[in-house]
Image (cartoon, rainbow, N blue to C red):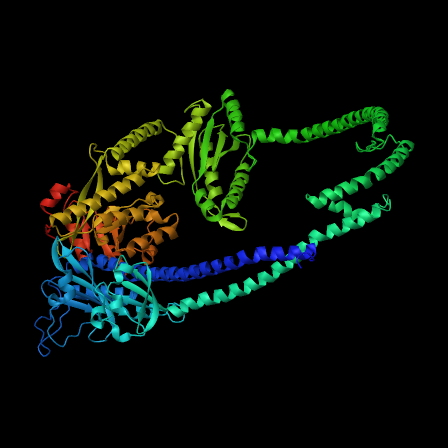
């Protein structure tokens, strides 16, 4: 029967059997692997969700609240509260009368603020070693209460870390809670214990809302194997695994970050376990095994469908392959039949035979041989006809050429070489003629193009020549003469023995315009000022742009320097009037340095350098003015260079030290705090001399960090020696606003040295708000949010504005010595009294600086000034001298 089957049917059966058997076993293998992968992937996903849940609880609930209780335990209100709180140790409802001290009210205010900021907190409590106790919400006992006997107190007292309790239910509200407790210390002595009680109901609800399939849920065990969360078995909460007899959970630690199968309440379950490395809480996800396996069943059904669909496609593919193999054989049979009738020239009917001949198999070889027989005959006939036509129609303009080509097996192959040699000679001659003609044409075109291009370039150069000359001597933005033109003009004037002045003018507030309104607007301002200055140009006035926002002016007088002063007055009038640029009113201030010739110099570079020194001097003394060069200005540059060298050496070699001047309360005579003042260890130079230079060259940023480090480390030293710590004021320069990492540096120092931010007061001057007021206010607000106090130093000098006091984030104003002297010397000091009263109405403390006489102390005390700093009480002292009278009480 097999012998009677056609080739096509035999192929179909062979291919089908060869594919079906491996396909069947391969399908079974893929199904099993896919089911195992899906099962494991489901378990991995559940473990990931458990780990994310644990991380969320640790970071948002436990770690953040441990940090909170640690920070609160360092608060001065807590540290110094022992002995100031109500005690309920011997509480009697009839005889007890609550008397809240100021310290207890301040602590309650702190607790209230913290609870309102952290809704998860249920209760904040603080008990002391003396039996004092305060909590928020307000404590209302109905029996004696001794916090020292409570587990949260006993477990935490005397320890260094934070103690997290086991979960429990409150006796009043029956809420599920935990407590986080921290021992409070003062001078290495236990003061008491601070406890935060955290409600777990919201946390449990959030965990139960997490999706673990249709039947899955999460149980949470404490480190002691007590249930914190137990959906579907709420009566298990706060019961231990041992009490409930749940053997499946007894050794749950061995399955951390793993999964296992087991039976619970007669049902097969899959358990996933994750134990928090931070809290030790054990998170157990439980899901029915049938639900996990149901996903595998869905995959199995899909694979069976795909299997049969693929089988149908394979059968179709086998049919097409068999047809593809047998169809050429049938066509070859037809061609052989035609050749048997000597029909070799019927080429059009044999296109399919040509396509079959390209096959790289036995069918292709047979087809190629048959096609060769047909091709030789047709080739001979066609080649002779084409060659005859080509000879008749030779055209020298035609690029293509014909060569007679016959196969080697063709009977007429021998004549192709002779005919093709003759054709090559003819075409070669034609190519030479065409090449000569093309070369002549190209050279002619190049000559024409070169002439046109050269003419255009000459015209372009001529058109740009005048503009190039203009740019050589003028500024491209303002079109004023540039520095080169100024040098040429000044050289001519000096050669003519003229008398006059070189003036270097600088726009004081141009940087602020660029920063606030943009560089394009700044360019418009420069062009506007240039036009205004250019309008002053005359035979005696030459104006040029020096660069940036600086202009060089050359003035030549005829009858004396008074003419120069009149010209400077005209410049002041120009800048004092309102200027409008693009419909925006712009206030421009300028500083100017003036160098005279020939009296100051007759050298061009020296005159400009002298004007620059004079400009530098006036900008350092307040700007918006002018100054004439003097010989002393050069001496100042030398002094400044020497001072910079001293400061660099001090920065590199620990050359700074701090002295401290007390600030005395007028109400009690006690020291309210200290101001830290910077000194050089090996040089008696005053800070008033080297601080401005440090601010100018930027070294104040490094010095500011050194000062901060010295002060914080000194406070830590005083804490270790057992002194009662008073706030210390640190001076903060406006230039330090460019130290963008200062806040992080300060907070890291405080944390590393265990110093409370309440002990730090930052003193600023009013000029810190002249630039970037918004960012400065935001920076100060952020410092205050950590508990750092802010004071305005030197109030009453420079840029003082009482309106600032209403919105600046400050706690204290320090009246400058000059302001105190001015008002205290008046017969009527009501102005000083009003200023102090205004500050008090804004909840600001007032400290008067530079007080040296007893009558000044009496007047300030009468005006209710809060504190005094000055030589009347004490000069700035070295640390060793200060510690001898650290807690001294002064006579006021």
Give the image location of residue 845, x and y in percent. 23, 56
Q: Is residue 397 above or below residue 6?
A: above
The residue lying toward the viewer, choosing from 540 and 737, is 737
The residue lying toward the viewer, choosing from 391 and 850, is 391
Please indicate whether residue 636 sits to the left or right of residue 544 in the image: left
Please indicate whether residue 259 sits to the left or right of residue 89 in the image: right
Q: Quadrant of residue 232?
A: bottom left
Look at the image and tell me in which quarter the N terminus lies.
Answer: bottom right
Please indicate whether residue 759 sits to the left or right of residue 737 in the image: left
Give the image location of residue 584, x and y in percent. 51, 50
- The reply to whether residue 734 is visible in this rendering is yes
Please indicate whether residue 345 sits to the left or right of residue 705 in the image: right
Q: Residue at x 53, y 23 (%)?
A: 492
Q: Quadrant of residue 357?
A: top right
Query: Please, which residue is most extreme toward the bottom here?
Result: 94
Give the image location of residue 628, x and y in percent. 40, 31
Give the image location of residue 568, x and y in percent. 46, 36
Query: Please, which residue is most extreme toward the right here?
Result: 392
- The reply to whether residue 793 is visible in this rendering is no
Q: Quadrant of residue 246?
A: bottom left
The residue lying toward the viewer, choosing from 744 and 826, is 744
């Amino acid at each position: 029967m097999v012998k009677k089957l056609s080739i096509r049917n035999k192929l179909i059966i062979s291919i089908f059997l060869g594919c079906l058997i491996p396909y069947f076993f391969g399908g079974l293998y893929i199904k099993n692997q896919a089911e195992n992968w899906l099962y494991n992937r489901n378990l991995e996903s559940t473990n990931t969700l458990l780990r994310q849940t644990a991380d969320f609880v640790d970071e948002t609930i436990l770690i953040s609240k441990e940090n909170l209780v640690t920070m609160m335990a360092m608060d001065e209100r807590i540290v110094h509260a022992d002995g100031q709180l109500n005690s309920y140790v011997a509480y009697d409802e009839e005889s007890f009368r609550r008397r809240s001290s100021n310290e207890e009210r301040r602590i309650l205010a702190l607790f209230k603020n913290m609870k309102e900021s952290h809704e998860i907190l249920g209760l904040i409590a603080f008990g002391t070693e003396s039996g004092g106790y305060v909590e928020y919400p307000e404590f209302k006992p109905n029996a004696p209460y001794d916090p020292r006997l409570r587990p949260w107190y006993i477990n935490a007292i005397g320890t260094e870390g934070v103690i997290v309790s086991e979960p429990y239910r409150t006796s009043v509200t029956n809420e599920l809670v935990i407590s986080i407790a921290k021992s409070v210390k003062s001078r290495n002595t236990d003061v008491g214990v601070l406890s935060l009680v955290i409600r777990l109901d919201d946390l449990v609800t959030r965990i139960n809302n997490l999706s673990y399939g249709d039947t899955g849920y999460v149980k949470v065990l404490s480190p002691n194997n007590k249930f914190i969360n137990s959906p579907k078995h709420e009566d298990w909460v706060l019961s231990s695994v041992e009490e409930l007899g749940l053997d499946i959970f007894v050794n749950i630690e061995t399955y951390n970050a793993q999964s296992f199968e087991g039976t619970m309440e007669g049902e097969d379950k899959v358990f996933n376990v994750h134990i928090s490395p931070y809290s030790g809480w054990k998170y157990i996800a439980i899901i029915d095994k049938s639900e996990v396996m149901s996903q595998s069943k869905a995959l199995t059904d899909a694979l069976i469908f795909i299997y049969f669909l693929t089988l149908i496609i394979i059968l179709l593919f086998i049919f097409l392959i068999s047809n593809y193999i047998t169809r050429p054989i049938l066509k070859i049979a037809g061609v052989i039949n035609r050749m048997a009738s000597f029909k070799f020239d019927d080429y059009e009917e044999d296109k399919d035979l040509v396509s079959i001949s390209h096959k790289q198999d036995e069918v292709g070889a047979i087809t190629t041989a048959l096609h060769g027989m047909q091709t030789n005959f047709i080739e001979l006939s066609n080649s002779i006809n084409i060659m005859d036509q080509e000879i008749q129609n030779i055209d020298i303009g035609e690029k293509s050429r014909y060569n007679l080509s016959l196969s080697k097996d063709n009977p007429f192959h021998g004549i192709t070489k002779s005919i093709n040699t003759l054709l090559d000679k003819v075409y070669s001659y034609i190519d030479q003629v065409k090449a000569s003609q093309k070369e002549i044409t190209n050279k002619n075109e190049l000559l024409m193009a070169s002439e046109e291009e050269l003419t255009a370039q000459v015209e372009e150069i001529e058109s740009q020549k005048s503009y190039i000359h203009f740019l050589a001597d003028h500024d491209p933005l303002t079109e004023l003469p540039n520095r080169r033109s100024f040098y040429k003009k000044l050289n001519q004037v000096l050669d003519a023995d003229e008398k006059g002045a070189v003036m270097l003018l600088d726009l004081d507030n141009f940087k602020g315009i660029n920063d606030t309104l943009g560089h394009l607007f700044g360019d418009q301002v420069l062009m506007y000022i240039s036009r205004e200055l250019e309008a002053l140009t005359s035979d005696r006035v030459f104006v040029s742009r020096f660069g940036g926002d600086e202009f060089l002016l050359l003035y030549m007088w005829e009858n004396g320097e008074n003419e120069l002063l009149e010209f400077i007055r005209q410049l002041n009038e120009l800048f004092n009037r309102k200027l409008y640029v693009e419909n925006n009113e712009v206030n421009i201030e300028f500083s100017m340095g003036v160098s005279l010739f020939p009296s100051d110099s007759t050298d061009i570079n020296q005159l400009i350098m002298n004007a620059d020194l004079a400009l530098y001097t006036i900008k350092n003394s307040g700007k918006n003015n002018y100054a004439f060069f003097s010989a002393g200005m050069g001496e100042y540059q030398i002094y400044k260079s020497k001072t910079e060298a001293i400061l660099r050496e001090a920065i590199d070699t620990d050359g700074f030290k701090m002295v401290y001047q007390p600030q005395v309360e007028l109400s009690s005579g006690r020291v309210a705090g200290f101001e830290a003042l910077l000194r050089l260890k090996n040089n008696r130079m005053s800070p008033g001399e080297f601080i401005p230079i440090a601010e100018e060259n930027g070294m104040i940023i490094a010095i500011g960090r050194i000062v901060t480090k010295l002060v914080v480390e000194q406070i830590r030293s005083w804490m270790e020696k057992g002194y009662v710590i008073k706030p210390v004021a640190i001076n903060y320069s406006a230039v330090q606003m460019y130290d963008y990492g200062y806040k992080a540096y300060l907070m890291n120092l405080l944390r590393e040295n265990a110093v409370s931010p309440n002990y730090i007061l930052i003193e600023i001057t009013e000029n810190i708000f002249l630039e970037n007021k918004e960012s400065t206010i935001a920076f100060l607000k952020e410092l205050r949010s950590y508990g750092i106090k802010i004071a305005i130093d030197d109030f009453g000098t420079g840029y003082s504005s009482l309106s600032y006091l209403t919105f600046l984030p400050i706690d204290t104003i320090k009246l400058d010595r000059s302001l105190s002297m001015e008002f205290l010397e008046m017969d009527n000091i009501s102005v000083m009294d009003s200023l102090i009263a205004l500050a008090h109405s804004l909840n600001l403390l007032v400290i008067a600086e530079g007080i040296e006489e007893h009558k000044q102390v009496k007047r300030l005390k009468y005006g209710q000034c809060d504190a005094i700093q000055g030589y009347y009480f004490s000069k700035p002292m070295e640390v060793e001298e200060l510690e001898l009278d650290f807690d001294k009480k002064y006579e006021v």
